Image: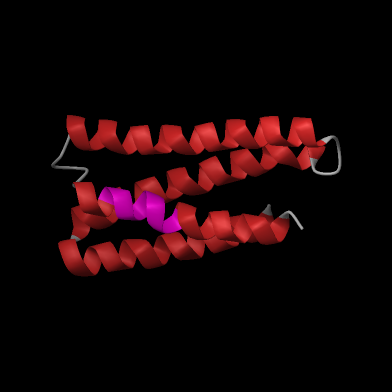
């Protein structure tokens, strides 16, 4: 879990800096908030599958599915935040913060599950 946290925080900082450079302060804040949400969701998903990594495949698939559901809820959270307060959560930086962190962490997860 620690490597995931480190990679997530570093990726979040990079994504927030990019958002700041392109769109300004508010965009960087939105990107950072959703980057943090992506890291939290990824850590929760990894915690779900950790106990059953070496167990029966059925249990692993079930918990992996729950983790994917959490990630889908993150996408719903983007839509809600942007829909309710577009001033504080501009669409592109908000999505960049979440997806720009979550997607690399998903690729990183494959390495952790070997």
Residue 15 percent across, percent down from the top left: 36, 63
Q: Quadrant of the C terminus?
A: bottom right
* 56 is higher (above) or lower (below) than 33: above
Is residue 70 inside the magenta stretch? Answer: no
Q: Name the residue at 47% across, 55% down.
A: 103
The outermost residue toward the left is 87
Query: In the figure, residue 52 lies in which quadrant?
Result: top right
Q: Name the residue at 61% across, 38% down.
A: 44
- Near-viewer residue (32 or 101): 101
Query: In the figure, residue 25 lies in which quadrant?
Result: bottom left
Residue 27 percent across, percent down from the top left: 22, 54
Tell me if 27 is positioned left or right of 52 in this view. Answer: left
- Near-viewer residue (106 or 85): 106
Colouring used for the render:
secondary structure
Q: Name the residue at 41% across, 64% down.
A: 13
Tell me if 21 is positioned left or right of 77 in this view. Answer: left
Residue 9 percent across, percent down from the top left: 50, 59
Residue 112 percent across, percent down from the top left: 71, 57
Tell me if 70 is positioned left or right of 60 in this view. Answer: left
Tell me if 76 is positioned left or right of 72 in this view. Answer: left
* 18 is higher (above) or lower (below) than 47: below
The boundaries of the magenta stretch are: 94-101
The outermost residue toward the right is 55
């Amino acid at each position: 879990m620690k490597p995931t946290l480190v990679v997530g925080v570093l990726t979040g900082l990079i994504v927030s800096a990019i958002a700041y450079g392109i769109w300004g302060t508010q965009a960087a804040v939105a990107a950072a908030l959703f980057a943090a949400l992506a890291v939290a969701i990824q850590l929760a998903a990894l915690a779900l599958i950790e106990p059953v990594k070496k167990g029966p495949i059925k249990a692993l698939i079930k918990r992996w599915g729950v983790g994917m559901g959490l990630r889908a809820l993150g996408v719903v959270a983007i839509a809600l935040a942007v829909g309710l307060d577009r001033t504080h959560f501009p669409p592109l930086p908000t999505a960049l913060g979440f997806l720009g962190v979550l997607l690399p962490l998903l690729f990183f997860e494959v390495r952790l599950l070997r």
